[in-house]
Amino acid sequence: MRYILRRLGFFLVTLWAAMTVNFFLPRLMPGNPAMAMMARFHGRLNGDSLHAMEVAFGVNSGESLIAQYFSYLGNSFTGQFGRSLTFFPQTVSHVVFSALPWTLGLVGVTTIIAFILGTLIGMVGGWRRGGLFDSILPPLFIILSAFPYFWIGLLSILIFSISLGWLPTGFGYTNGTVASLSWGFAWDVIRHAVLPAATIVVTSIGGWILTMRNNMIMTLNEDYVRMARAKGVSSARIMFDYAGRNAILPNLSGFGMSLGLVVSGAILVEYVFSYPGVGYMMLQAVLNEDFPLMQALFLFLTLAVLLAILVVDGVTVLLDPRTRGRT
């Protein structure tokens, strides 16, 4: 129990530190969202209009920095991040939650698929090291992981969309289609997600394979594995229950940390495929100096990584008896 409480304390302290950095960084930059919006009107707005925009964007120059900080904390916990400069006059919360399902469906699913496939391939490769399986699949995926996200995405568009015409070139669904809860629309969304999903899986699976294979080889040399073999335990049980269960622990620890790297890579994938997710939206926010939207998206990414690490810690407690012994 003490272990879980320590992890929860780490989660809260890290979240507070991230929120604090997220608050001060935009305010250290010259200008603010209201000034950027005023520039669009070529300075034709008066002082009252500028003050109203500052309040709408959550940057009230009439308040002290401390007051703005506590207002920011309160608004963050209630989901009030002001209004987006890029999608004005929509609120930041509305804009983020409109893109969130697309990224969760794409990046979330593909990250889990890449982790599971990479772990299984690395486990089997380590178990049968030196064999035909270990000589083909792990090196192939490791080489593919060295290529940039956007290069694999552009190559897949060239082959499967332009040359063969099997799949759409981009976007979340066919232009002009009305979003609805129907099998036709769901199939259309799946077809548009195949290429970006495959790009993410192909370029991220190699790391899981390499790590799991190395861990598996080291674990197979442990005394308890040799003892299991001497006692006549079946090969499948040794591979999964004895060696695999312990070899996967370092992979689980890195799974939460890698989520942020996968999302950052998904920015390029979503940009190449014009996919309406959080990554593409973050790029638009940076290009348009949309500080409220950037703050919300950075906070979302931080929260996603921290939650993933917290879940991974819980799974580690269940899989590793030694961790339970220290609680």
Image (cartoon, grey):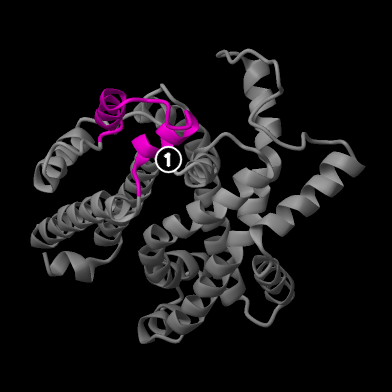
Residue at the (73%, 57%) spot, across then down: 152
**In the foreground, 20 or 101:** 20
Dominant secondary structure (helix, strand or loop) of the stretch shown in magenta: helix
Image: magenta residue range: 31-58
Badge 1 density bin: few <14, some 14–19, many ≥20, Cα 10 Å: many
Q: State whether residue 46 is above or below residue 106.
A: above
Position of the N terminus, as image quadrant, is bottom left
x and y, in percent, of residue 123 in the image: 54, 69
Residue at the extreme right of the image, as rendered? 163
Task: Describe residue 121's horizontal placement relative to residue 308 as left or right.
Answer: right
Residue at the (40%, 31%) spot, across then down: 84
**In the foreground, 327 or 270:** 270
Task: Describe residue 59's horizontal placement relative to residue 115 as left or right.
Answer: left
x and y, in percent, of residue 321 in the image: 23, 67
In magenta stretch: residue 323: no
Q: In which image quadrant can residue 210 be found?
A: bottom right
Task: Describe residue 299's horizontal placement relative to residue 275 as left or right.
Answer: left
Q: Which residue position is annotated with label 1?
A: 290
Residue at the (53%, 66%) spot, across then down: 208
Q: In which image quadrant can residue 166 be found?
A: top right
Position of the C terminus, as image quadrant, is bottom left
How many labels sit on residues? Answer: 1
x and y, in percent, of residue 224 in the image: 36, 81
**In the foreground, 320 or 22:** 22
Identify the amino acid type marked 1: Asp
